[in-house]
Image (cartoon, grey):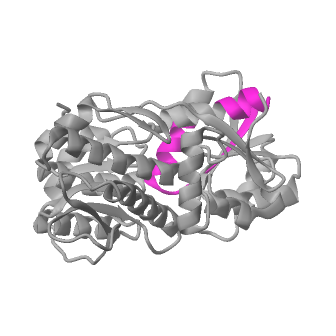
Amino acid sequence: MKKRSLIAGLLCAALLSACGGGTAKTESSDAKASGDKIQIAVCGPMTGDNSEYGIGFYNAAVLKAKEWNDNGGVLGKQIEIVQYDDKNTAEEATTIAQKIISDKKVVGVIGHFSSGVCMTAAPIYQENKIIEISPSASHPDYSGIGDYIFRNNTVISKEAAASIDIAVNDLGKKKVGIISIMTDWGTNTSSIIKELIAKTDAEVVAHEEVMEGSDDYTPAITKLNEAGADVVICCGMYNLVAPVAKQYKQINPDIKVVGFSNAYSQQLIELGGSAVEGVCFPVIFFSESDDPTIKSYVDSYKAAYGNAPSALTSQAYDSVGILLTAIKDANTTDSEKVKDQIYKTTYQGVTGEIKFDENGDVDKQFVKVTIKDGKFVKMDK
């Protein structure tokens, strides 16, 4: 059993006094479902700047639930996906978590999206023995909040190492600039990058923090360029990487840009156009894989939603599969028994083999991806 960190205990004490309502959208994946259903909550930003991620989580969960429902559901019951919009804020996540524990209907939570929001809600779930599996939380402290808290995503230090490997070894650059969003995730990630680069023969020549959602990154870009950066690592989502690439290439057309898997989205190409040609990042899931299982999943997702699934979306898809498999194998929805079963489960998903360690963490292999001719392709070895 995992021990709670100090920060988790403090968060829990502060947050359990909160209360609220919250609204939810419910969808059963089979119109013929009747009687008692097994509810799974999907929590994330369904509106606002990061809504693509929350909607992707929800769509993937509905798709996975439909697959199970078409085969009889689980424990003889249909699976119902309940959608909660946390707007990617700690306040809304607290309200939602309180509603979920008050209703006592949800067997598990898939979400939330950002690490900071996850770490706000997780102590509430832990205290009330609700399983939470985040497809995207990468902060090192998240999974340490408790034994009901899981992450189906690598810790940020491993992904940062993969991004640095691309910048320094694959692209052959030695003067690294960092541009990061002013969030807990951005601050933590940029600090980890600096620590890791200090162990290489490259150097960080400049680091600029920016407000998420800004339209003009020119001041930060100018400082990075004047410092002599020949590669820039962007600690942010596609809505940072796309405008940074556009604006940077107006100043220095030869700049190389490296991101993280949270930028791996069709929105990056749509927003960035030709400016994001050559942008690279490590991903756990690659939608253009020729693996038959992945191709079948991607085809089903495209047929249902009109676009290819991202890496984080696919981790949500697998997270629902892990939870349902544990319920089936435990032959109960009792949260303690299901939680224990999750630790015992080895699950072969579209994002690879998934096995949680004693901390509720997974270890996954990265694929190096770049944008060429307006499409995502594997980087040349």
Drawn side of residue 350 relative to residue 337, left or right: right
Q: Please name the residue shown 25% across and 76% down the image.
A: 22
Counting from the top left corner in percent of width and height, residue 219 is at 73, 61
Residue 279 part of the magenta segment? no
Magenta-highlighted residues: 165-193
Above-or-below relation of 69 to 178: below
Q: Please name the residue shown 74% across and 44% down the image.
A: 377
Quadrant, the N terminus? top left
Q: Please name the residue shown 22% across and 44% down the image.
A: 328
Counting from the top left corner in percent of width and height, residue 329 is at 21, 38
In this view of the protein, which residue sits in the foreground, 370 or 18? 370
Can residue 129 be spotted in the picture? yes
Drawn side of residue 334 relative to residue 96, left or right: left
Q: Quadrant of residue 87?
A: bottom left
In this view of the protein, which residue sits in the foreground, 257 or 77? 77
Counting from the top left corner in percent of width and height, residue 134 is at 36, 49
In this view of the protein, which residue sits in the foreground, 44 or 205? 44
